[in-house]
Image (cartoon, helix red, strand yellow):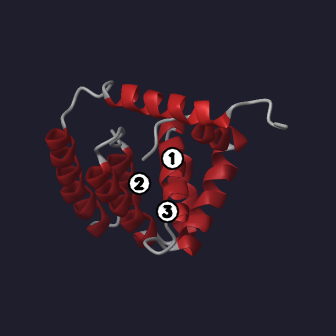
């Protein structure tokens, strides 16, 4: 006797197909995306060394790599965002988050959740403090938008 009213196995196949279709929405090749992330990393590190966390974060969050087969670029960009979050002083987090656009806050929240899903690679204490400030600034709408978005970083 089946207690499920919904065939979960069918949802997994649909999710896989949707992810594959989203991969083709990108107009850039894997090499172009990797090159873009490398270019961003130089600019971001320069902004961090100047102490400009907002500029560094806006640059790192612009055009995040989405899609299957982009795992190397996604990982490199996640590490880049993590470097910025770690380099920002705790008292500056609120002002940096407040100055971000709504779209940038949502992308930042995606990176925070990515980091929390991989605790061996990222400092979860820092990520939680950033999460608190992003939710204070963006409200629960940011969390809902990130959870509903199928594009992952």
Name the residue: 60% across, 30% down: 10
Element under label 1?
helix
Of pointers 3 and 1, the one earlier in the residue sequence = 1
The residue under label 1 is 99
Residue 57 percent coordinates (x, y) = 39, 53
Q: Is residue 147 above or below residue 118?
A: above
- Count neighbours of disc 2 (C-alpha within 10 A) and say few if under 14, some if 14 to 19, many if 20 or more: many
Circle on res. 31? none
In contact (CB < 8 Å): disc 2 and disc 1: yes
Inter-mark Cα distance, 2 to 1: 8 Å
Residue 130 percent coordinates (x, y) = 57, 62
Q: How many marks?
A: 3
Circle on res. 54? 2
Residue 143 percent coordinates (x, y) = 65, 44
Q: In screen coordinates, is 149 left or right of 121?
A: right
- Asked if one can make out residue 93 in the rendered structure from this viewpoint, the answer is yes
């Amino acid at each position: 006797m089946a207690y499920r009213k919904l065939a979960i196995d069918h949802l997994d196949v649909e999710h896989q197909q949707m992810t594959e279709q989203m991969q083709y929405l990108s107009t850039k090749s894997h090499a172009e995306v990797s090159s873009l992330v490398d270019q961003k990393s130089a600019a971001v590190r320069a902004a961090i060394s100047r102490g400009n966390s907002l500029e560094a974060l806006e640059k790192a969050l612009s055009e995040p790599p989405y899609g299957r087969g982009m795992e190397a670029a996604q990982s490199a960009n996640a590490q880049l965002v993590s470097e910025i979050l770690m380099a920002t002083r705790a008292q500056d987090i609120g002002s940096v988050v407040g100055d971000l656009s709504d779209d940038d806050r949502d992308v930042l929240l995606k990176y925070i959740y990515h980091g929390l899903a991989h605790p061996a690679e990222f400092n979860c204490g820092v990520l939680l403090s950033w999460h608190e400030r992003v939710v204070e600034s963006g409200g629960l709408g940011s969390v809902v938008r990130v959870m509903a978005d199928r594009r992952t970083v």
